[in-house]
Image (spheres, rainbow, N blue to C red):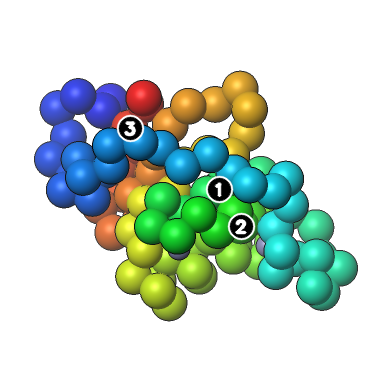
Amino acid sequence: MGADTHCPHVYGIANVKPPQVRQCDECVKTGAKWVHLRTCQSCGATLCCDASPNRHARAHAQARSHPVVASAEPSERWLYCYPDDIVTEY
Ligand SMILES: [Zn+2]
Ligand SMILES: [Zn+2]
Ligand SMILES: [Zn+2]
């Protein structure tokens, strides 16, 4: 995993953006629940993961063409690229 991948999106990230909030703002608006949080590495938005009912991080990535998220969970250090479907530890 990671070192031998050829994802230009993850390759272009020099510093991983940490989450600014510990919630999915889109879920909060509607009172929805989320499972885990992901932080967009293009704009810093923190949204919910694919295991969450609303998958706001994936919807955001597709709508804005922001390809890479980082796990916003404190114990996890990895990046995920939606278009390439690649997980990279850092
Ligand atoms: Zn990529
Ligand atoms: Zn959400
Ligand atoms: Zn974004």
Q: Amino acid at mark 1?
A: Arg
Q: Residues within 10 Å of mark 1 (few under 14, many from 20)?
A: many
Query: What residue sits right under mark 3 in the picture?
Result: 88
**Element type at marker 3?**
strand
Alpha carbon separation for disc pair 2 and 1: 5 Å
Left or right placement of residue 83 versus residue 43 in this view: left
Q: Amino acid at mark 3?
A: Thr
Q: What x and y, as percent, mark residue 82?
A: 35, 56
Q: Secondary structure at mark 1?
A: strand
Asked whether residue 32 is in view, the answer is yes
Q: Are marks 2 and 1 in contact (CB under 8 Å)?
A: yes
Residue corresponding to mark 1: 38
Residue 35 visible in the current orientation: no
| First reached walking from the N terminus: tag 2 or tag 3 | 2
Give the amino acid at mark 2. Answer: Leu
Residue 57 in the image: state x and y as whole percent: 53, 60
Disc nearer the start of the sequence (3/1): 1
Q: Is mark 2 within 8 Å of ligand 2?
A: yes
Residue of label 2: 47
Are the residues flagged by discs 3 and 1 in contact, CB closer than 8 Å?
no
In what quadrant of the picture does the C terminus appear? top left
Determine the residue positioned at 82% across, 74% down.
30
Callout 3: 10 Å neighbours few (<14), some, many (20+)? some
Q: Which percent across, then down, holds residue 28?
A: 80, 65
Disc on the earlier residue, 2 or 1 = 1
Q: Is residue 57 left or right of residue 25?
A: left
Give the structural element (helix, strand or loop) at label 2: strand
